[in-house]
């Protein structure tokens, strides 16, 4: 592993108090920090337990201004930004289907599968298929219910580490994405984009069953329950179920 990760991590973590004790005094490569393919995936303590949340609190995160990806290393953020700018310098492997170019031949081979539609990794539980085995493993957590990334500040847990990283901003209070039209600020760029529609009046999420339209896809998903009859909020005391959680909360008062 590149020693830059080692040096960067050591800058942020006090080895005397951090629960993830760096093996700085050892000649071995420290195995408890693993930065994999740009995003922070997990942290492993010396006894083998995995818990990313405490480590996250040490790190001054930097968000991409174009999407909701989050990074702790400036170099990795710069590398990621090239995916938005289309910069091809030092990328000799050019895709013949589009303008993208890559620094490694293996990355090009993986990319061309997007054009061919090839998805060799098939889920055994549903009809989903994926380009990469790693993506299939993450997808399988939907079926197993596994959520290995637990927040140390509340009872939230997530199937993907990137979602935990985003969630931790709720506890830190970080709101770096500011609206230029009002004084509101948001933790994620995606939230800001959604909010801006309240100023423009844009409602891109159109219902296919009626003439209703919504600024947020989540609002459309809730609205669609009126057409499907889905009532996902089930009372634990009787067989009643409800369209909205607020209706369930009101109903629960009848049992008390």
Image (cartoon, grey):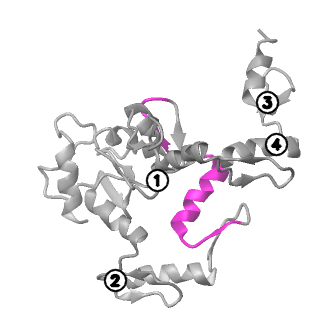
Residue extent of the magenta highlight: 128-154
Q: Which residue is mark 2?
A: 91
* Upstream in sequence: badge 3 or badge 4: 4
> Which numbered mark, 3 or 2, is in the foreground of this view?
2
The residue carrying pointer 2 sits among few (fewer than 14), some (14 to 19) or many (20 or more) residues within 10 Å by Cα, namely few
* Upstream in sequence: badge 3 or badge 2: 2
Label for residue 234?
3
* Upstream in sequence: badge 4 or badge 2: 2
68 and 211: which is toward the camera: 211
> Which numbered mark, 1 or 3, is in the foreground of this view?
1
**In the picture shown, does residue 96 fall above or below 223?**
below
Label for residue 225?
4
> Between marks 2 and 1, how big is the CA–CA gap?
25 Å
Q: Does the CB distance between marks 3 and 2 fall below 8 Å?
A: no
Label for residue 68?
1
Q: How many numbered discs sit on the rendered protein?
A: 4
> Between marks 4 and 2, how big is the CA–CA gap?
48 Å
74 and 177: which is toward the camera: 177
Q: Secondary structure at mark 1?
A: loop
Question: For this view, does 114 lie left or right of residue 10?
Answer: right
74 and 24: which is toward the camera: 74
Q: Quadrant of residue 47?
A: top left
Q: Position of residue 53 (x, y in %)?
A: 39, 40
């Amino acid at each position: 592993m590149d020693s830059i990760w080692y040096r960067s991590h050591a800058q942020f973590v006090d080895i005397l108090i951090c629960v993830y004790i760096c093996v700085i005094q050892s000649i071995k490569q420290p195995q408890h920090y693993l930065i994999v393919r740009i995003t922070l995936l997990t942290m492993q303590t010396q006894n083998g337990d995995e818990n990313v949340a405490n480590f996250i609190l040490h790190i001054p995160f930097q968000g991409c201004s174009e999407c909701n990806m989050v990074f702790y290393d400036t170099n990795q953020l710069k590398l990621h930004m090239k995916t938005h700018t289309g910069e091809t310098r030092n990328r000799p492997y050019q895709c013949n289907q589009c303008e993208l170019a890559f620094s490694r031949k293996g990355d090009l081979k993986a990319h061309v599968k997007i054009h061919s539609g090839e998805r060799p990794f098939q889920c055994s539980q549903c009809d989903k298929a994926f380009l990469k085995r790693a993506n299939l493993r993450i997808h399988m957590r939907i079926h197993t219910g596994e959520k290995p990334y637990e927040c140390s500040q509340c009872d939230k847990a997530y199937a993907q580490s990137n979602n935990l990283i985003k969630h931790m901003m709720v506890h830190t209070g970080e709101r770096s994405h500011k609206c230029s039209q009002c004084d509101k600020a948001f933790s994620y760029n995606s939230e800001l984009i959604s909010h801006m529609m309240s100023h423009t009046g844009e409602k891109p999420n159109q219902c296919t069953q009626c003439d209703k339209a919504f600024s947020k896809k989540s609002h459309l998903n809730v609205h669609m329950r009126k057409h499907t009859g889905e009532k996902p909020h089930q009372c634990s005391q009787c067989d009643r179920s409800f369209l909205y959680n607020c209706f369930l909360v009101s109903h629960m008062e009848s049992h008390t």
